[in-house]
């Protein structure tokens, strides 16, 4: 099967998966969080499943099948989770034990994806975003940045991109101060990146774990530059840092899409392009290999996936994971393969799933013909699968050993 047939089959099966996750509750139209999700016992997770279902269908171009009435039903479903200040929240989920501002993280996270899903359908929130009034002045944003903890660069990268997404929407709707705050955020990043890695974090970035965390955070911060069409500072160092991690193989959906996002967007600068393309090709081949029979994708191949008190078994398909993995596939395909760019509709709001083709203008001509002129696959899929299965086996043995050790200590 060639790459074009493989992509077509992946898209078709994924569309069938999203269709199978639909839940109709009276006048509302939802998607389940995962194949094992019971909306009765975990109603809050319908928010997660619905924004993922919407954005996944839009990505695949399935959404034209939604007529005006259906779009309205989806909007009603999402807006049931909106609070009067404009934020979106999952009700009846366990409170996380952590920093006080983790509550802000959760609110920003749900709000960005829910609001983005509504906009992708041409629908609107029920309430205005009054929660953004506290960022109207420059000094307010300065205080917010002063409270960031860059030892948690992955978390803070998410916080940055969520806030940037809200500001971008407000700017597009005519709020001049929002555009000023966006530029202020980019200015802050210009002067605070790490001189060695190019990312935004504390520490020297020598340890693999800390470098991985910094990379995952930076994938979000960088959306500011793509959206504002500003040159990325230390772009070559960022690519070097990503390649220092090597080809990591398929792991969690978040980690995979983060490194793919960076390499696809920064490929245009031409630095170590052959190595970048090799990493992207291998990710594409492996991602197409790990799609489940039901058309979805899991998040974890070793341990159950737990999110806000809901657990999905190992390897079982999760709706948001399926969207994330399709985003990764679509980004690589759009970057490397001729004719693929027009077949994927990425979200226009900032955050995971945002892909700015205009930012890639310096590399699209070569990128569009890269794989189309050469036989597929370039990397041996059998060897990739064997290495992946061996890696998962080692991880399962390690996880089992840790469980037994913990039980023995108790």
Image: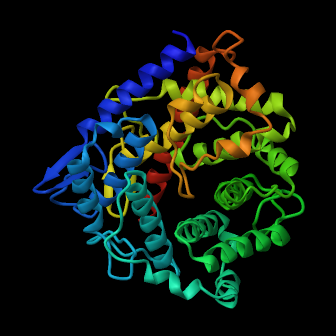
User: Residue 270 versus residue 257: which sits nearer the camera?
Assistant: 270
> Hey, which quadrant is residue 243 in on the image?
top right
Residue 399, percent from left and from top: 49, 47
> Hey, which quadrant is residue 213 in on the image?
bottom right
The image's colouring method is rainbow
How many numbered marks have been drawn onto this rendered protein structure?
A: 0
Task: Please report the residue visible at 77 percent of the width from the left and 25 percent of the height from the top.
Answer: 366
Residue 130, percent from left and from top: 44, 83
Furthest residue to the right? 195
Task: Please report the residue visible at 45 percent of the width from the left and 20 percent of the height from the top.
Answer: 8
User: Residue 215 versus residue 362: which sits nearer the camera?
Assistant: 362
46 lies left or right of 185: left
Residue 229 in view (yes/no): yes
Furthest residue to the front? 174
Residue 37 in view (yes/no): no
Residue 316, percent from left and from top: 34, 39
Task: Please report the residue visible at 43 percent of the width from the left and 78 percent of the height from the top.
Answer: 129
Furthest residue to the left? 26
Task: Please report the residue visible at 71 percent of the width from the left and 60 percent of the height from the top.
Answer: 228
> Hey, which quadrant is residue 13 in on the image?
top left
278 lies left or right of 14: right
21 lies left or right of 283: left
Is 183 placed above or below 116 here?
below
Residue 148, percent from left and from top: 66, 78
User: Residue 196 versus residue 231: which sits nearer the camera?
Assistant: 231
């Amino acid at each position: 099967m060639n790459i074009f047939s493989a992509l077509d089959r992946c898209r078709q099966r994924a569309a069938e998966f999203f269709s199978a996750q639909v839940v109709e509750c009276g006048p509302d139209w939802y998607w389940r969080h995962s194949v094992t999700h019971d909306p009765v016992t975990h109603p809050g997770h319908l928010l997660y499943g619905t924004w993922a279902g919407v954005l996944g269908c839009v990505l695949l171009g399935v959404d034209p099948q939604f007529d005006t009435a259906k779009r309205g039903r989806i909007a009603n479903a999402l807006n049931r989770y909106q609070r009067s200040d404009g934020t979106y929240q999952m009700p009846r989920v366990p409170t996380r034990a952590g920093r006080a501002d983790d509550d802000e993280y959760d609110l920003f996270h749900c709000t960005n994806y829910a609001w983005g899903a509504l906009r992708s359908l041409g629908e609107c929130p029920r309430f205005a975003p009054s929660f953004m009034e506290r960022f109207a002045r420059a000094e307010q944003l300065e205080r917010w940045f002063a409270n960031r903890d860059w030892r948690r660069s992955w978390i803070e990268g998410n916080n940055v991109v969520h806030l940037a997404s809200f500001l971008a929407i407000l700017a597009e709707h005519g709020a001049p101060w929002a555009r000023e705050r966006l530029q202020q955020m980019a200015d802050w990043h210009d002067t605070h990146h790490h001189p060695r890695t190019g990312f935004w974090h504390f520490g020297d970035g020598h340890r693999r774990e800390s470098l991985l965390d910094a990379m995952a955070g930076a994938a979000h911060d960088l959306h500011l530059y793509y959206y504002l069409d500003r040159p990325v500072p230390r772009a070559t160092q960022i690519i070097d840092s990503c390649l220092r991690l090597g080809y990591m193989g398929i792991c969690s959906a978040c980690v995979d899409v983060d490194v793919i996002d960076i390499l696809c967007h920064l490929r245009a600068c031409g630095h170590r392009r052959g190595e970048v393309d090799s990493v992207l090709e291998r990710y594409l081949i492996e991602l197409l290999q790990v799609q489940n029979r039901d058309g979805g994708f899991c998040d974890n191949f070793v341990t159950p996936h737990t999110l806000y008190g809901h657990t999905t078994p190992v390897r079982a398909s999760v709706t948001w994971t399926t969207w994330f993995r399709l985003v990764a596939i679509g980004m690589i395909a759009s970057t490397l393969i001729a004719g693929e760019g027009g077949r994927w509709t990425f979200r226009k709001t900032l955050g995971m799933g945002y892909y700015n083709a205009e930012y890639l203008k310096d590399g699209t001509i070569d990128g569009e013909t890269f794989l189309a002129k050469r036989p597929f696959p370039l990397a041996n899929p059998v060897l990739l699968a064997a290495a992946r299965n061996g890696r998962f086996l080692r991880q399962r043995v390690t996880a089992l050993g840790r469980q037994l050790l913990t039980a023995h200590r108790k």
